[in-house]
Amino acid sequence: MRKKFLFVCIIVLLSLSLILSGCSLSASNEKKQELTIWTFTDEAKYAVEKFKEKNPDIHVNLLFITNDNYVQKLISVLQVEKNVPDIFFVENTYWPQIKEIPRLENLSQAPYNAEEILKQQFQYIQDMEKDEDGIIRGLGYQGTPGAFYYRRDLTKEYLGTDDPDEVSEMINSWDKIMEIGERVYEESNGEVHALSSWSDINIVESSNVKEPWVVDGNLVIDSVRLNELDLVKEAREKNVEAKYESWGPAWTASMQKGSVMFYAEPTWGLPHIFEKNAPETSGKWGLAHGPKTFSGGGTFLAMYNNSKNKDLAWEFMKFYTSDPEFSKELAKSQQYFLSNKDIDSELAPKLTSEFLGGQKYFEFFVEAGEQVPSAPQTKYDNDINGLWSDKVNNYLNGRYKTKEEMLESFKTEVGHNFPEINVD
């Protein structure tokens, strides 16, 4: 009996050992199914939740960091290679700088072969996803072609129509916009302006430059930027633009008030600018093509090249950028225009916006997206663009008497901030 009892005890212990071993193995496997993502935008939450619904065995650690601290924190961890997330979101403003850091996975190579995803995207997005050597370093999930959002009530009153095609024809050159702006300002006794700010000109022109800010270590001021200076000066002197500060309280209030006819903004301006700041004006807006096609903003997903979870990271990146079911749901429920032009085109005949007076807005942006130029980029863009904007503001406000004086000050400032750049 004693021997039988010992035998039973041994069997029980072995069984417990196997069970505990199985639990340990299960826990180990579960631990391997973890993915860490850093983001600066709360729109990531929607994608993560949908990804988890489709992949319940994957645990996603989503860390939201405020935009002011995000980029510097990301650069720091990439440089020291400590606590680096598997995936990180990067806003277009900082993407040219981040994608040249040698810590981003090469997505052109197997097993990713990301070129297959890029084939479905607009060309200007494809060009941004690649580094200086043509290697794919990230994937964009958002399409950001621009439009001239216009108040239908104002165009009907002052231009005689609110038809998108007719309005587009009326503003297909800056000369036409200047003429409209002068007339509207006069007829409204200074109450209505054609443009909200000189930024409406800048966002268009900066998308159409041919030369980057820096070439072979030399500062380059593209002829498009020089022409922009003349345009913004003319718009200011003729009261074509309302002198509002973009994103300022007067700027946002003007959308509800109806004191500006046109705003040049990208796709995401619909939910995040106009619907947000002027919800009571639904139905009073339309989209028109302006003097040139342009884009604005956008966000990219990149993967750490020493991540231990590359397979999971790639699954999420593919899901966010090319999964048909998710993409269509994102587009329909969030009014989200995609980087994937194939899916955008499929949805284009069906999607309309009540806020835009029933206009087929995906159809409009697909047409615009096909024509957006690929503006050259450098790692200096964010900083130099900031310096340029400051100088243009000062020029328009009379601090510089001539364009030449403003340009010399701009060059000096660039030289002070970046001594490695030749500004002469």
Image (cartoon, rainbow, N blue to C red):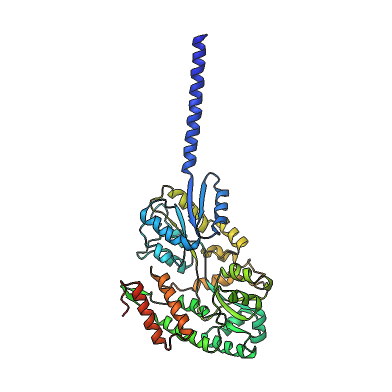
Q: How many marks?
A: 0
Q: Please provide percent x and percent y for residue 115.
A: 43, 60
Regarding residue 141, the answer to whether it shows in the image is: yes
In the image, taking residue 203 as reference, residue 351 lies left or right, namely right
In the image, taking residue 271 as reference, residue 142 lies left or right, namely left
Between 243 and 172, the residue placed more toward the observer is 243
Regarding residue 105, the answer to whether it shows in the image is: no
- Residue 387 sits in quarter: bottom left
Q: Please provide percent x and percent y for residue 77.
A: 40, 55
Q: Quadrant of the C terminus?
A: bottom left
Q: Please provide percent x and percent y for residue 317.
A: 48, 55
Which residue extends farthest top?
Answer: 1
- Residue 105 sits in quarter: bottom left
Q: In this view, does 304 lie above or below 277?
A: above
Between 228 and 106, the residue placed more toward the observer is 228
Residue at 53% x, 78% y is 200
Residue at 45% x, 67% y is 93
Q: Please provide percent x and percent y for residue 1.
A: 52, 8
Between 161 and 341, the residue placed more toward the observer is 161
Q: In this view, does 325 lie above or below 338?
A: above
Q: Is residue 282 above or below residue 47?
A: below
